[in-house]
Structures are given as structure tokens and as C-alpha cells.
């Protein structure tokens, strides 16, 4: 396949690119190296892929319609994996309009470029577990009502799901949305808890623990997510939405302990109140992804953390 991957230099994107190349596909990556975290980190993410003949990286913005038309015309993709976005829940409260612009307008631009081709590509895009908002009942199923997102980031991701439905209806595009549940692993996004906590434990700094430590997240190893993304593209047909999670949530205190163990250090804790926009739990029901995609998370949490620490230590 010829595949365009947006957000190719990012955390998840770079793993998806590596996986596609390993499977023998041709990949065109698109990334604007935005300032959410340092471009040097993103350049390192794609360093290995850039040495591959079947990979080309285009630097540009998903909101640039003319660039997309040219890129799609040139690449004639069989598939598009759209992962570029402004990520992060808490920062979205500081700059909600930017999140809507990049995530929603950007997604519309990608779908426009796709539907204009005579042979439109299949499109897989990233949504998020955050669309489920703050709820007591778990695990989360795709059939549940998700119309109460509690952060601009979550609202932007839910909006992408609605836009996908519109483009399927109007143009018959085959589109699959994937609700990722907190990815972690090598190249971890530096703003996410696992990367931050690891840095702090290594520097003997106290870890800010928001709430009483009982919040839980369904941490999912990034290569398991990349596997689910590729499966979703191979089986993309009609309009679909899937949870991609580990279906085994880890409470915050256990997360901190597991990182401490992997580093061989005892973490210090600084208790803080819960942050606005944060949800108390995420927990994926992955029955649908298992059944339709053959998705199966393989890497247990402690092993994933061990691999992350190993990568970090080079
Ligand atoms: N990491 C997670 O746990 C998680 C969970 C749920 C959903 N997601 C979603 O998965 C996708 C990938 O997330 P990630 O963690 O790899 O984030 P990331 O920030 O590492 O990757 C996103 C990439 O998109 C690029 N980008 C941003 N704006 C762009 C624009 N306007 N034009 C072109 N490129 C642009 C960035 O430079 C970056 O390389 C995002 O859509 C994110 O919302 C991630």
C-alpha cells in the first residue's frame, strides 16, 4: 500500500511509520513539527525511518489545503492514517481555539483532500478515550453516549468523529476512528505522566500526585496501538469506531511504584488537588476491536515500563 501518515514525527505516528515500513508499505509522512514539544525530539523519532527508501517526509501543516491537494495528487494513497493533532488535555484549557483549529479544521482538510481524489483512500484517524468524559461505569463501550466531553481537547476529538460521519454520508468515504487509551513506551510524549514522573524520580524530585492516587488509566503499549492502527487500515470498510486500549487500568499509585521499581529508586510524592479537565478513570472495552480487527494488546504494563526505561537509558 501507499500510505500517508499525518503526525508522522510524533510519538504514536513514528511507531506507525516504523510498523508500516517493516510490513513493506510505502509511506509519506506529513508533520509540521509544531511547538507542543521540541522538534529535536520529533526529528529523533523519525531518524531511523528517514534512512528507509520507502519513506518520504513532507514538512507542512494539515490545515494547508493547497499543500494537501498537491501531496494527495502526487502520492495517490491507498490509505491515510491521520494522527496529526494538538494533543494534551490540560493545555487545551489554555488555548481552546487552537485545539479546535488544528484538530477539527485540520481533519476536515484531510477528509476534503481524500474525497477529491478519483479513487479516494481509506482513512483511519485518531480519536481519544477522553471523549467518554468523566464517568463511573466502566469499561467504556463504543455504543455509549459520548456527548459530554469535559475538556476542549476531548470536544475537538468528538467533533472529528462527527465530521467523519458526515464525510462517510456525503461521499461514501471508508473511515475508521480509533479511540486511543493513553499510549506509553519508547519515544513517550514528554508531557505525559509516565515521561514526567520518570524524569522526576531520576532527579530525586517529588512527584505531584493529583487527587488521592486512586485515578486510573488504561495505559496501552505504543506498539500494540500501532498494530491496531495498521489492522484498522487493512480492514477499513464503511464507517467505524473502535476503542484501542489495554483493557487493564492501572491506578496512579501503582503507576508511580512500577516506574520506581523499573528505575530501582523510591519515588517521593507531593499530593495536589485534582486538575480541571482530568477524568477519574479510563478503561477500554475492546471486544469490538478484538472481533472486527483481531486486535490483542500483547505487552503487560510492568513489561512496557521496563522497555520504556531501557529505551530511555539508551
Ligand atoms: N498519546 C496518547 O496517549 C493519545 C491518546 C489518545 C489520542 N491520541 C491522539 O493520537 C494522535 C497522536 O498523538 P501523539 O501522542 O503521538 O502526539 P504527538 O504530539 O507526539 O504527535 C502529533 C504530531 O502531529 C504533528 N502536528 C501537530 N499539528 C500539526 C499540523 N497542524 N500539521 C501537521 N502536523 C501537525 C506534531 O508535530 C506531532 O509530531 C493525536 O491525534 C492524539 O490526539 C494520543
Image (spheres, helix red, strand yellow):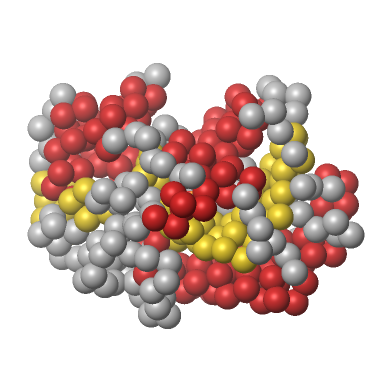
Q: Quadrant of the C terminus?
A: top left
Foreground residue among 203 and 214: 214
Foreground residue among 301 and 243: 243
Q: Answer left or right for 16 relative to 69.
A: left
Q: Quadrant of the N terminus?
A: top right
Q: Answer left or right for 86 relative to 265.
A: right
Report the residue at 44% width, 49% height from top.
Answer: 290
* Residue 267 percent coordinates (x, y): 13, 37
| 47 w.r.t. 121: above or below | above
Report the residue at 76% width, 24% height from top.
Answer: 53
* Residue 135 percent coordinates (x, y): 26, 72
* Residue 149 percent coordinates (x, y): 39, 75
Q: Is residue 31 shown to the viewer in this render?
A: no
* Residue 40 percent coordinates (x, y): 54, 35
Residue 50 sits in quarter: top right
Report the residue at 14% width, 38% height from top.
Answer: 257
Amino acid at each position: 500500500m501507499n500510505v500517508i501518515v499525518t503526525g508522522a514525527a510524533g510519538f504514536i505516528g513514528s511507531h506507525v511509520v516504523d510498523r508500516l515500513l517493516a510490513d513493506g508499505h510505502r509511506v509519506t509522512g506529513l508533520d509540521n513539527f509544531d511547538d507542543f514539544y521540541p522538534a529535536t525530539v520529533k526529528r529523533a523519532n523519525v531518524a531511523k525511518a528517514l534512512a528507509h527508501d520507502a519513506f518520504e517526509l513532507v514538512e507542512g501543516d494539515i490545515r494547508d489545503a493547497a499543500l494537501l491537494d498537491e501531496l494527495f495528487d502526487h502520492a495517490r494513497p491507498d490509505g491515510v492514517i491521520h494522527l496529526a493533532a494538538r494533543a494534551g488535555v490540560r493545555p487545551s484549557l489554555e488555548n481552546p481555539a487552537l485545539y479546535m483549529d488544528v484538530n477539527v479544521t485540520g481533519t476536515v482538510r484531510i477528509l476534503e483532500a481524500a474525497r477529491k481524489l478519483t479513487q479516494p483512500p481509506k482513512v483511519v484517524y485518531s480519536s481519544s478515550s477522553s471523549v467518554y468524559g468523566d464517568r463511573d461505569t466502566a469499561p467504556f463501550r463504543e455504543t455509549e453516549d459520548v456527548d459530554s466531553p469535559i475538556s476542549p481537547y476531548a470536544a475537538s476529538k468528538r467533533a472529528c468523529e462527527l465530521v467523519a460521519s458526515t464525510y462517510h454520508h456525503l461521499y461514501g468515504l471508508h473511515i475508521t476512528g480509533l479511540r486511543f487509551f493513553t499510549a506509553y513506551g519508547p519515544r513517550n510524549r514528554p508531557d505525559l505522566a509516565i515521561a514526567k514522573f520518570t524524569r522526576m524520580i531520576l532527579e530525586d524530585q517529588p512527584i505531584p500526585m493529583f487527587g488521592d492516587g486512586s485515578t486510573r488509566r488504561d495505559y496501552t503499549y505504543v506498539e500494540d496501538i500501532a498494530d491496531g492502527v495498521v489492522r484498522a487500515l487493512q480492514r477499513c470498510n464503511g464507517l467505524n469506531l473502535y476503542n484501542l486500549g489495554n483493557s487493564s487500568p492501572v491506578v496512579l499509585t501503582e503507576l508511580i511504584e512500577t516506574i520506581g521499581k523499573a528505575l530501582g529508586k523510591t519515588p517521593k510524592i507531593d499530593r495536589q488537588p485534582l486538575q480541571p479537565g482530568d477524568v477519574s478513570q479510563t478503561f477500554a472495552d475492546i471486544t469490538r476491536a478484538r472481533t472486527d480487527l483481531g486486535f490483542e494488546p500483547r505487552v503487560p504494563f510492568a513489561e512496557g515500563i521496563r522497555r520504556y526505561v531501557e529505551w530511555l537509558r539508551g
